[in-house]
Image (cartoon, helix red, strand yellow):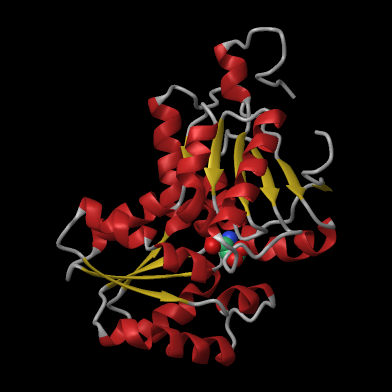
Amino acid sequence: MIKPSSNKPLLKSDLNNLPIGVFDSGLGGLTVVKQIFSRLPNESILYFGDTARVPYGSKSVHTVQKFSLQIVRFLQEKGVKMIVVACNTASSVALDVLKESTNLPVVGVIEPGARAALGVTVGRRVGVIGTTATISTGKYAEILKRIAPDIIVESAACPLFVPLVEEGWTDSPVTEQVARIYLKPLIEKRIDTLILGCTHYPLIKNILQKVVDSDVRIVDTSVETAVDVENILKEKDMLNTGTGQTHHQFYVSDFPQKFEEIADRFLGQSLPDVKRISLDDPL
Ligand code: DGL
């Protein structure tokens, strides 16, 4: 692996060959990796899932910022050309501090999701669902209103969705019932667009669509984030235009077996060798 910190100056082509660093609180960020794979097949990915400390969605701002800074340091030490914060919770509470901590381009999932919602809403009533931490920051509403002050935003925290998805209950009547309870206030407010503000929610998109009605447009932030990643790499002339040979690496902070088992569902393919690394260990 070529590291930006090595003594030899990096050629532009070496830099462009570096992987894109993607991180999440666990395995949910693989929904973003899946979209990057399909949009940018020449790019290598270096993924870190903080499986020892997941979930982030119920933790404090300070804690999520601290964990996120550690992970960005790890990715930077490993040698990446850009950082993608695939976790909605980390994007909501830590994006600004992460941008200040590194010279690398840093992309979160909130702004791409908000822009996409504004592109499809017809009635200017946007619903946002996410973890408790994501919703309590009000970050989606803030960005939506900054871009379009007339927009009406209705938000709901849906903390049970993450464990239900991780249990594999992605088409269970139990999940549908839970969705009906969580989404009732948004339906009553007549939202016409729904932002899936959590890495796990694309896996229950069918249930959510059924519950909110077929007219409501559902915005999958993972798709929009991959579009942003491509745009930034193009703009900065950092696309990997090499031989097309990719080398993906996956790291987790707890034992990798469960990650490997569930990853299939998120990524739609099995993973190469997943390595465990403790961020307390020397890199
Ligand atoms: N990855 C988190 C998110 O997108 C969901 C899981 C967690 O709470 O850590 O907000």
Q: Position of residue 255 (x, y in %)?
A: 85, 57
Quarter of the image where the C terminus is located? top right
Rendered image quadrant of residue 10: top right
Q: Residue at x 19, y 64 (%)?
A: 151
In the figure, 83 relative to 25: above or below? above
Q: Quadrant of residue 37?
A: top right
Q: How many marks?
A: 0
Give x and y (percent) for residue 16.
56, 22
Query: Which residue does the image show at 30% across and 57% down from the upper left?
Result: 142
Relative to 212, is 181 on the left or the right? right
- Frontmost residue, 59 versus 7: 59
Q: Quadrant of residue 246?
A: top right
Judging depth in this view, the residue of 64 and 249 nearest the camera is 64
Name the residue: 33% across, 56% down. 114
In the figure, is residue 50 to the left or right of 36?
right
Q: Is residue 151 above or below residue 92?
A: below
Q: Position of residue 18 (x, y in %)?
A: 63, 26
The foreground one among 103 and 107 is: 103
Residue furthest to the front: 62
If the picture is divided into quarters, which one holds ligand 1?
bottom right
Locate the N terminus by quadrant. Answer: top right
Q: Residue at x 57, y 49 (%)?
A: 65
